[in-house]
Image: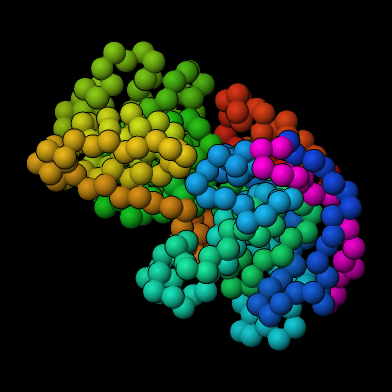
Amino acid sequence: MSYDIPKTQIAAVVPSPKQKIEIRRDTHVVQQSELEPGQCLVKLICTGVCHTDLHTSRDDWPLKATSTPLIGGHEGIGEVVAIASHTENCPVGLGQRVGIKWIAYCCRDCEECRKGLEQDCQKVQLSGLTVPGTFSQYTVSWVHNVTPIPDSLDSYAAAPILCAGLTAYRALKYSDARIGNWVVLPGAGGGLGHLAVQYAVAMGMRVLAIDTGEEKKRLCLELGAEKWIDFKETSNLVEAIKDACDGLGPHCALVTSPYSSGYSQAIEYLRDGGTLMAVGLPADANLDALIFWTVVKNISIKGSYVGNRQDAIEAMEIAASGKVKVRYEVRVLTELQEVYEELEQGKVAGRVVLDSSK
């Protein structure tokens, strides 16, 4: 099997830090002869848009792009159309549908990789930050790091699982929360939050959803949240959360907030022995926790950063089973700048997935 690979493609490019997206129609497509052993070329079907992409384009994160011009994106679904010569033990084949995640490459041999912390690999490469990402029609990735996509899962539904779904699933998996435990999810009606609700329910946890507005309330309860709190209609959020969870507070808080208050409040409302999972990535907010109560209440604070290859496969399989369904809107690649502006204005409900062909 062989494919006709064009010389150029359409790509959404950040020309330099803090600059608006440019749509370029003459971006080079890496040819099979240019691939290094272990690499593959993927013809993209679609790609999700994440807040991380917005941060990298604005250059307002501690993590910096290696160079510009930059092609962002890290929720890409596509078909393998070329594999490098001399690639050993290749787990994927030509024509196979795969996903490209934030973690584009890990060495699989360092201490972090051996412990399952591939996202902290000393040689890690990040899609759309240190290597070209998925806001294009073709992209290069590594055969041992792409994620196989189950046949039963639609490409557009699969794309957000590669980051938002993986992040939510991994945080719950390592949270120490058990079947029947209460999990509180601030921002439950958002792009990551609505997936976290479903993964928590699929894992047997009881979900207290926190957000605002009737539309988000309806969505969260439809997805399986047991209880709901509208933070704009609640005068004492800490006490309301405690009361909703048996009067003792939740066993786990999965916090994605860009503000430090979301984390300090969690220390107050978590029950004794509870776990705060810090998931959001604000650029410069501090995590303030009263040491006395953190110690006396035996609170655990854990950071959870995307996930490893196995986490991604598990998150994808749960979605393929029908237990997690992504709410998304389809746009086209050339509309990426408009999508960024809508993200900044808070106008995006659920996730946006771009058709890579247009």
Q: Quadrant of residue 342?
A: top right
Residue with the most extreme left position: 296
What residue is rendered at 21% in x and 31% in y?
268
Is the stretch drawn in magenta largely helix, strand or loop? loop
Instruction: Tell me where the magenta segment starts and ends, as one range.
Output: 1-19
**Quadrant position of the C terminus in the picture:** top right
Q: Position of residue 281 (x, y in %)?
A: 45, 42
The spot of residue 132 in percent (x, y) is 69, 57
* Quarter of the N terminus within the rendering: bottom right
Residue 218 on image: x %, y %:
47, 24
Q: Which of 64 and 141 is in front in this view?
A: 64
**Vertical comparison of 123 with 271: above or below:** below
Name which residue lies at 89% across and 53% down: 26
The residue nearer to you, when weighing 199 against 125, is 125
Residue occupying image coordinates x 44% and y 34%: 258
Q: How is the image coloured?
A: rainbow
Q: In this view, does 55 lie to the left or right of 208?
A: right
